[in-house]
Image: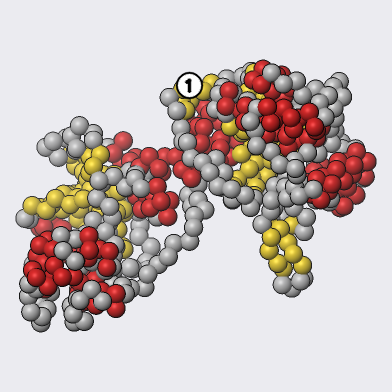
Amino acid sequence: MIRSEQERVRLDSLQQLRQLGIDPFPAAAYPVDTHAAPLAADFKEGAEVCLAGRILSRRIMGKASFAELQDASGKIQIYLNRDELCPGEDKTTYNTVFKKLLDRGDVVGVKGTTFTTQTGEPSVLVKELTVLSKSIRPLPSVKTDEDGNVHDAFTDPELRYRMRYVDLLVNPHVKQTFEARSKVIQAIRDQFTEQGWLEVDTPVLQAIPGGAAARPFITHHNALDIPLYLRIANELYLKRLIVGGFDGVFEFSRNFRNEGMDRTHNPEFTIMELYVAYKDYHWMMETIEQLLGRVCSAVHGSTKTTLAGQEIDFTPPYRRVTMRDAILEHTGVDIDGMDEAGLRQACANLDIEVDDSMGKGKLIDEMFGECCEAHYVQPTFITDYPVEMSPLTKVHRDKPGYTERFELFINGTEIANAYSELNDPIDQRERFEEQVELSERGDDEAMFIDQDFLRALEYGMPPTSGVGIGIDRLVMMLTDQTSIQEVLFFPQMRPEVFRTGPDLGALEALGIPADWAPHVAAAGFDTPEAIKEAKPTALREKLNGYRKKNKLDLPALQIEEVQAWTGA
């Protein structure tokens, strides 16, 4: 592996630490007894403290130096005085280890005494310094000036998502987003467990991918020699538990759908599903209103938040609009009683792209998605979906052709989906058979028939209401994010190609001598493109400077030969 100049310097420092008898990666536990943020918030002078963290900056001033230490809670200043750190004759820890062999990004432990500097900065006077982890790669150098302007920020989305560990270290707001995510999940869990409902786990590998209309990922179980699917939903397993006698069950489920990726979709995502016996979708709407008010308060201390510059109010009650009324309002089309041909023509009139595999449910869904969703910015329940859109939902008690279902929309995005659950096994079998017909027409998102689930329903499932809440999308709303990648630690991306080293042959093909090629690559010009993009004069100066610094037994480069490499 060809290392950059900074990396080679750090590797050399690592070896020098070892030569001094210092393990740069010690195994022993370090006795941390305080953290930066609480120490600064409740600062008392003269306290003996022990903390650990990463060096973010150093200001070396002869016999005394300052450094900024960052731990999981925040930052604090540390002060190193040579004679305080090294009271004896041996000053190696300060003069060599701290000043010469440590770098920005290294993890250290310090023991010392708190004090306030003349400028009023809470600080720790270091009496003992321990190297805990020597970093080989330098962190991005993000700077903030006196006016709060950020320079050289680590903002490239692809780099941030691929190297989330670096993103978290240098962009504090990113860590705050994921702390908010944790609060969202904990608030939901607290409310449900207070009600006496049971948190459960259900299978991720499933013989039948049921509970949703989506394209699954397929894998193979070698021992059983059968295909299996990564779950697209956990709904049918949770309903089995209601049949089994539990009054309320919920699960934070990792689901997988082999579909497109965009700002609101990731192939792997988190959903929370809740099922409660003897309830209906009216009760569930009220429950979700109360829940989201509590969740927003847990994150912001209020039931209001700001998203894309607009205030979103989670205070109950939320507006309720039927699916029929929503489409009628925004398209002028009344879907009530309309057959498939009529819906297909309505989509054509609205310039909505459809295909022959789509049945009535998909056509209505396309119409709502294209023409209506974006209008619902404040929390709004869209209710009473046509039966063709809802194969697992109980038919509406008062409206033939419709079901007792709602979806919650916020900022034009679906956040929750809930039903009065279908518990008639005969009706459920017929709905599944209709899905099979759609599959035969080419709909690769149609549901499978789950015979075991039908058998469970035949033992009798109490009247039940269920809901699924997209955790990732909810966190987006509560943290003012416009991309789902911002609320996932490690979003799905194309695999990164790691080069084991430069193609020295390609460099030599430019005319670079074989004895110079590895050094040219080590200096940072490791591809023909990098050579051709460089200015010959600057390239010559840098390579000759590299030659001198590393005492290479090679003749100095002349401008004419460097110009020949670059094609100038």
Q: Quadrant of the C terminus?
A: bottom left
Question: Along the horizontal axis of the image, is 20 left or right of 404?
Answer: left
Instruction: Judge by depth and name the residue closer to the eye, 163 or 526.
Output: 526
Tell me the residue at 23%/34% (across/down): 148
Q: Quadrant of residue 276?
A: top right
Q: Disc 1 residue type? A: Glu
Instruction: Judge by depth and name the residue closer to the eye, 556 or 523.
Output: 556
The percent coordinates of residue 540 (x first, y second) are 11, 67
Question: Along the horizontal axis of the image, is 267 left or right of 430?
Answer: left
Question: Relative to 474, does residue 505 appear above or below in the rendering?
Answer: below
Crowding at mark 1 (Cα within 10 Å: few <14, some 14-19, many 20+): few
Per the image, the residue denoted by label 1 is 311
The percent coordinates of residue 263 (x first, y second) are 51, 41
Instruction: Judge by depth and name the residue closer to the eye, 453 or 461.
Output: 453
> Would residue 280 be visible to someone looking at this image?
no
Question: Along the horizontal axis of the image, is 280 left or right of 451?
Answer: left
Tell me the residue at 35%/48% (across/down): 156
Q: Quadrant of residue 251?
A: top right
Tell me the residue at 61%/33% (across/down): 415
Applied colour scheme: secondary structure
Question: Relative to 280, does residue 538 appear above or below in the rendering?
Answer: below
Question: Relative to 358, does residue 560 appear above or below in the rendering?
Answer: below
Which secondary structure, mark 1? Answer: strand
The percent coordinates of residue 262 (x first, y second) are 53, 44
The percent coordinates of residue 342 (x first, y second) are 78, 28
Tell me the residue at 51%/36% (across/down): 476
> Would residue 565 be visible to someone looking at this image?
yes
